[in-house]
Amino acid sequence: MASIKTNSTYMLVSKLSKTVLDVVAVMLLARALSVQEYGFYKQFLVSQQILTAVMSLGIPSSTIFYLSSERKREYLANVYIALGIISILTILITPLSAKLFDLNFKTSFFTTNWLELAIIYALSVFVTASENMGLRVPFSSCQQYNQIDSRVDMI
């Protein structure tokens, strides 16, 4: 079982490297793209963040709880099945969401490229939900958190 220090270090390195890569990517893209191309890039990011937030359905948080229990292997298979189903649903709703984004942003970018966007959106949902799978939180810590959380809900 991994210690809290190991988990904290893992999370710190993970979040720090993601932040550094995001800053570097924005700097490079701002210099390499024209104003219109950068606008399309930002529109794509907004659409991707909206769909990822909606379609992840709380799975990133639940993976920490369920994968910390003694029945980790059973839950891991269930998480992958759920992520597969949600990714397929994301691909299926992408044409509708592409039309909505086109209406909102007054462009035809999303309906023109809906298949590529569907794959990117589905992978984003999968990656967002699976980033917490490497953590190993002691199951007793999760139970203590739930007891504290239920007491707060009663107040």
Image: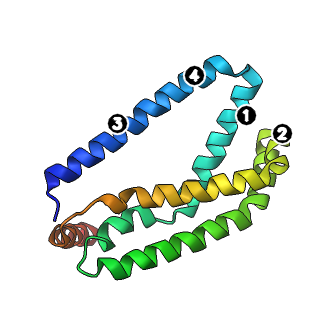
Q: Secondary structure at mark 1?
A: helix
Q: Residues within 10 Å of mark 1 (few under 14, many from 20)?
A: some
Between the C-alphas of marks 1 and 3, the distance is: 26 Å
Residue 117: horizontal and vertical position, in percent? 71, 51
In the rendered structure, the answer to whether residue 16 lies left or right of residue 81 reads: left
Q: Secondary structure at mark 3?
A: helix
Amino acid marked by disc 4: Leu
Counting residues from the N terminus, which is met first, the one under dot 3 or under dot 2?
3
Amino acid marked by disc 3: Leu
Task: Work out which quarter of the rendered image holds the C terminus and state it.
Answer: bottom left
Q: Residues within 10 Å of mark 3 (few under 14, many from 20)?
A: few
Amino acid marked by disc 2: Thr
Residue 74: horizontal and vertical position, in percent? 36, 82
Give me the disc on residue 107. Answer: 2
Q: Residues within 10 Å of mark 2 (few under 14, many from 20)?
A: some
Please say if the residues under marks 1 and 2 sit with CB atoms less than 8 Å apart: yes
Amino acid marked by disc 1: Phe
Residue wearing tag 4: 28
Depth check, mark 1 against mark 4: the one in front is: 4
Between the C-alphas of marks 2 and 4, the distance is: 24 Å
Give me the disc on residue 16. Answer: 3
In the rendered structure, the answer to whether residue 57 lies left or right of residue 102 reads: left
Residue wearing tag 1: 40
Residue 65: horizontal and vertical position, in percent? 30, 69
Q: Please say if 105 is above or below 79.
A: above
Q: Please say if 71 is above or below 54.
A: below
Q: Secondary structure at mark 2?
A: loop
Counting residues from the N terminus, which is met first, the one under dot 2 or under dot 4?
4
Q: Secondary structure at mark 4?
A: helix
Depth check, mark 3 against mark 2: the one in front is: 3
Depth check, mark 1 against mark 2: the one in front is: 1
Q: Residue at x 75, y 48 (%)?
A: 101
